[in-house]
Amino acid sequence: MKRLTPYVGLFFLLLTTGCATYQNKVGKARASLVAHDYETALKELEPLANKEDGDQLVYLLDYGVAQQISGKVKESNVTLLRADKLAEQVDYQSISRVAGSLALNEEMVQYKGDTFEKIFINAYLAMNFLELGQLDDALVEARRINEKYQKYRQEEKQKFELNPFSKYLSAVIWEANRDYDDAYIAYQEAYKLDPTIPHIGEDLIRSAKLARRPDTYKDWRKKFPEVKENPDWYNKSLGELVIIYQQGWGPRKYTAQNEYRLPALYPTPSETKIARVTVDGGETVVSHPIYDVQEAAIKTLKEDYGILVAKRLAGFASKAVLADQVRQKNQLLGDLTFLAMNLADRADLRQWSTLPQTIQLIRIPMKPGEYKFNLEGLSLAGTPTGEALYNQKVTIKPGQKKFVVWRSLK
């Protein structure tokens, strides 16, 4: 019996290994954010984000966005900068963790994040800096986005993985700094990634002209004959209100219905679908989508499915070998160990789960001055959903852009 004691301990350890999944750990925090109970949400996520283990990156990402939603923008930047540094570290897997992932479950492997998530880190940092009015710091993130874009393009990543929103946002940042040539290049690259971005034709025509590229400007005019140029685009005495609207919640990872060892993404329903801004009771503008996070996440998982299936098949074989070693000591414990290892096996449900469903934009050229605006969330039918920002004050200066970041949660 003394010789069998370690195997008995192993058996019960395996039975308890698969209890607390990632989704279980962050579920309460997400629910608290929806209820606007920000204090509870942050208290739930903070210890997870500060724990140095193989899951730290995913919790830093969730915590950073939760801080942004809670209005703690500076604190969000501190967290996301930690996440960016961690994500860029040299890929390293301990032998024990890789082996454990085969014997038990994929969540034992260090979380590294998907490509579009890694680029999103810098987009979120840029959004935070823009909201704080720190354009120079936002420009640093625009450069980081470009560095990652070049790196991942060389690795032949799919277009949706290269995150068109981040590239588009970098174009807006360059334009805000009056670096019109860099802005044009970024708009062009965003167009190559996703030519369906609303109003991208206007952006290309405007930025090409501002960048003093006459031939390119003429080419885009021919490409988009339906675009009517607005003289306000080139009026340097005007400013611009730019609202970056994060709509809803991205899809959630849960166990696939037909195979508990594999993950599947399920859409998260939301009532608020678009945003409408009304400035001083006058001009009303509705948001338009720039990037579908839900679609990118689903395509990424589909792209990775072949690798995931191969890993789980290898894991099944590893379990059989380990269980057979126990059977050589005791047949019953060997059978129970094989059963326990398969029960402990589970899908990797980790993801950056505080991302929105879509990223949308509102851009309004405005004369310099002090304004008040209302920002309302609307359903697909165009009716207000109750999510709103009322009587928001904004100062527009000549030739400058004022950025507002807003998130709907229901």
Image (cartoon, rainbow, N blue to C red):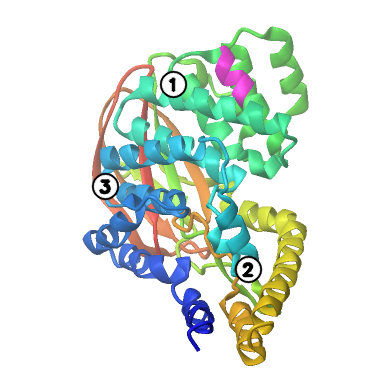
Helix or strand or loop: what does disc 3 sit on? loop
What's the amino acid at mark 3? Answer: Gly
Does 209 sit above or below residue 366? above
Disc on the earlier residue, 1 or 2: 2
**Distance between the alpha carbons at the discs numbered 1 and 2:** 52 Å
Disc on the earlier residue, 3 or 1: 3
At 61% from the left edge and 35% from the top edge, which residue is drawn? 199
Label 3: how many residues lie within 10 Å, few (<14), some (14-19) or many (20+)? few
Name the image quarter holding residue 132.
Answer: top left
Q: Is residue 150 left or right of residue 289?
A: right
In the foreground, 290 or 68: 68
At 50% from the left edge and 75% from the top edge, which residue is drawn? 18
Please name the residue that numbered disc 3 is placed on: 71
Span shown in magenta: 181-186
What's the amino acid at mark 1? Answer: Ala
Label 2: how many residues lie within 10 Å, few (<14), some (14-19) or many (20+)? many
Disc on the earlier residue, 2 or 3: 3
Does 139 sit above or below residue 87? above
Please name the residue that numbered disc 2 is placed on: 103
Helix or strand or loop: what does disc 1 sit on? helix
At 61% from the left edge and 28% from the top edge, which residue is drawn? 202
Q: Position of residue 229 (x, y in %)?
A: 60, 23
Does 295 sit above or below residue 122? below
At 42% from the left edge and 52% from the top edge, which residue is drawn? 53
Q: Is residue 173 visible?
A: yes
Q: From the image, state whether disc 1 or disc 2 is nearer to you.
A: 2
